[in-house]
Image (cartoon, rainbow, N blue to C red):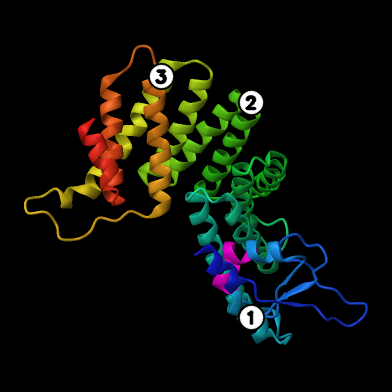
Amino acid sequence: METQELTRAARLIPLALPKGTEKLCELCQNRAYLQCAQCRVTFYCNDSHQFADWVGIHQLICPLLVPIRLYQDLSKESKIEKDIKKRELIGIARAVAERKLGEGKHEEALPAGQTCLSFSIDVFGPRTIQLVPAYLLLAEANMGLGKLSQAAELLSQAEWSVSKHSDCGHEVRHRLHRSLGVLQTATGNLEGALFHFANDIYHAEEACLDSTVRSKGHFLMAGVFAKQGKTSIARSMYNQVAQTWHSQLAKLTEPFLEDPPSSMQPTLDRATQVEGDKILQTILDFEQKQIRKEPGLIVLTLHCLAMLWFMAGDRVKVNLVTWA
């Protein structure tokens, strides 16, 4: 599959530009020497950057870039039409980046995040509040790759933008504090992490987000308490997170446990599956390492994992938990 995708993606032609002109690479902004043979309006410094962009976002938006980048009609109507198309691309790129981050594909999320940021700057201008979602996506991708200095720079720009807009919504603030908390945890500033996760939880509650989304703040905070050796507090918060997931998964699996069962095939999107699996496995590992274990939390977490894997269609793992 990867070889076929590479073959499809590797449609490049060398740039032949008039003397004194140059194009910049879509990913790194260095001088480009290659051109996408399909849209002919996207450029790269080498084939590895072209492939990274193709896998990350370009294969989805290649033809959509042509009317935006090729035609230079400066009329008011043309500008409005281009802005509409750019906003559509922002939405596509943001959705792709969020999905890839949810699946743990941090490297692939970078091109989508960069596309989101680039077109957001084109439409809304630099240093505006509308750039914050793109900054947060790119920061999360960089943190996932261990590039903490780049993540810190992106988050400082996001924090500056939010500080200049007192009317900024709770959802944006929740995401900002969550990212700042993750960064502080990674750099060892655990008290700073707790501060940001507390704000994350508050703003997530005010934004009335889905319960599993809100519980992620409690999960991250519990991880900090665990690092500090505050086992009882961490266990209490992990239990709260497991209860939240159990409630949500029970609602999803209930139709398939009826007599007779639903004929529909249970499904779960990949991002939710990866996120839930990571959270629940972390809770299970934490509790199983304790000298004095809490059997109720272990059973609760295993039941959550069984329901999660059932929804994901992984019957092998479900049977393993059942026999355990």
Q: Earlier in the sequence, mark 3 or mark 2?
A: 2
Seen from the viewer's position, the closer of residues 103 and 214 is: 103
Residue most extreme to the right: 20
Q: Disc 2 and disc 1: Cα gap in Å? A: 48 Å
Seen from the viewer's position, the closer of residues 282 and 242 is: 282
Q: Earlier in the sequence, mark 3 or mark 1?
A: 1
Task: Give the residue type that dot 2 points to.
Answer: Asn
Question: Residue 57 sits in which quadrant?
Answer: bottom right
Q: Residues within 10 Å of mark 1 (few under 14, many from 20)?
A: some
Q: Disc 3 and disc 2: Cα gap in Å? A: 24 Å
Q: Pinpoint residue 304: horizontal percent, then vertical percent.
A: 29, 37
Res 7 visible: yes
- Marks 2, 1: nearer the viewer: 1
Label of residue 289 in the image? 3
Task: Give the residue type that dot 3 points to.
Answer: Lys
Question: Residue 81 sits in which quadrant?
Answer: bottom right
- Residue at image mark 2: 189
Count every numbered label the image shows and give the total.
Answer: 3
Task: Magenta stretch: give its range.
Answer: 53-61
Q: Residues within 10 Å of mark 3 (few under 14, many from 20)?
A: few
Task: Give the residue type that dot 1 points to.
Answer: Gln
* Quadrant of image for the C terminus: top left
- Residue at image mark 1: 38
Q: Disc 3 and disc 1: Cα gap in Å? A: 54 Å
Q: Pinpoint residue 318: horizontal percent, then vertical percent.
A: 25, 41
The main secondary structure of the magenta stretch is helix
